[in-house]
Image (cartoon, coloured by chain):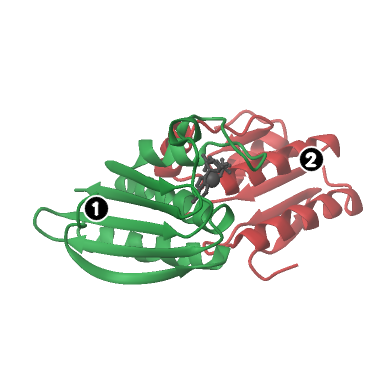
Chain colours: A red, B green
Amino acid sequence: MSAASAIYFVEGVLLVAIQEDISDTDILDLQEALAERIVRDSARAVVMDINALEIVDTFVGRILAQLASVSKLLDAQTYVVGMRPAVAMTLVELGMDLPESKTALSLSHALQDLRGKPLA
Amino acid sequence: MSVPEGALVSVCVLLRDRDVLHARRVAGQELEKLGARSVKKTRFVTAVSEIGRNAVMHGGGGEARIYSQVHPPCVTVVCRDKGPGIADVDAALCDGFSTAGSMGRGLGGARRLCDQMEIETTVGKGTCVTMVARL
Ligand SMILES: Nc1ncnc2c1ncn2[C@@H]1O[C@H](COP(=O)(O)OP(=O)(O)OP(=O)(O)O)[C@@H](O)[C@H]1O
Ligand SMILES: [Mg+2]
């Protein structure tokens, strides 16, 4: 696992903060590491914080989408949190969406959703 | 396309994914110096990422030249490779067209994300994509 992003395991949830300068290789490594961790830790969800990402291009977008699909097959829900407004606008223009992942404004929104509580 | 407007700021070699990261950082910094807003910057840097990645993945590597001009304010990125070229540019610009089994959204997406984009390509010789962001 590269140092580009650390994975934390809290309350059955894998938390990942993606670093700003993550390279293609790093994110591919992350995808693999996360799939393994979901099974090893019996995680019920993966929360990916992408707030540090200034841009999400088609490559990173595709990896994020694949990650969510893999997680789903392994019975874990993926949340993408912290997406910058400009990134959201750009993704729409690229014609990309993240079908299998839930998006939440912040980590606490995602955790609240996971606990089944309505958002405040 | 005619000579890029402004002064040459940087020449970035594009051989690996890391190089694309560097080129787009330089492009973003130049836009910031000109006072670009975050949406403008994100859009253009994303376009540079797509085109730079294409040069590395399909073009066998190349270089990006970054130009900046204050009056009127604009940043231009010229991305050139000596790869196989694109046989049918109109088809390649369509969302969903890919010879790499990928999503094929890069080229068309990049064109929507910058203010001006021109593609010059010759089969067997290479590809040169010029992207302009105007402020
Ligand atoms: N610099 C280049 N040299 C040669 N062919 C290119 C170049 N750039 C693009 N192409 C061709 O145009 C096609 C479309 O490019 P585009 O970026 O839209 O899609 P892609 O790179 O295949 O997938 P992605 O959605 O991941 O970017 C490519 O599959 C490739 O055949
Ligand atoms: Mg591409």
Q: Is residue B109 something one can see in this rendering? A: yes
Whether the residue under disc 2 has CB within 8 Å of ligand 1 = no
Query: Residue at left 48%, top 35%?
Result: B88
Amino acid on which disc 2 is placed: Val
Question: Where is residue B53 shown, x and y percent of the image?
Answer: 52, 54
Residue B47 on image: x %, y %: 41, 47
Q: Residue furthest left?
A: B71
- The chain holding disc 2 is A
Q: Which mark is residue A70?
A: 2
Q: Compared with residue A47, is residue A25 higher up or lower down, i.e. above or below?
A: below
Position in image of residue A10 (x %, y %): 76, 54
Residue depicted at 30% across the width and 46% down the height = B40
Label 2 sits on a secondary structure element that is: helix
Distance, label 2 to label 1, CA atoms, is: 38 Å
SS label for mark 1? loop
Q: Residue at x 74, y 52 (%)?
A: A31
Q: Given the current orientation, which residue lies at the most extreme front position?
A: B124
A102 or A64: nearer the viewer: A64
Quarter of the image for residue B43 reads top left
Compared to residue A116, the image places residue B32 above or below, namely below
What's the chain of the residue with tag 1?
A: B
Residue drawn at point x = 24 percent, y = 69 percent: B8
Q: Residues within 10 Å of mark 2 (few under 14, many from 20)?
A: many
Depth check: A76 or B56 in front?
B56
Which residue is denoted by mark 1 in the rendering? B36
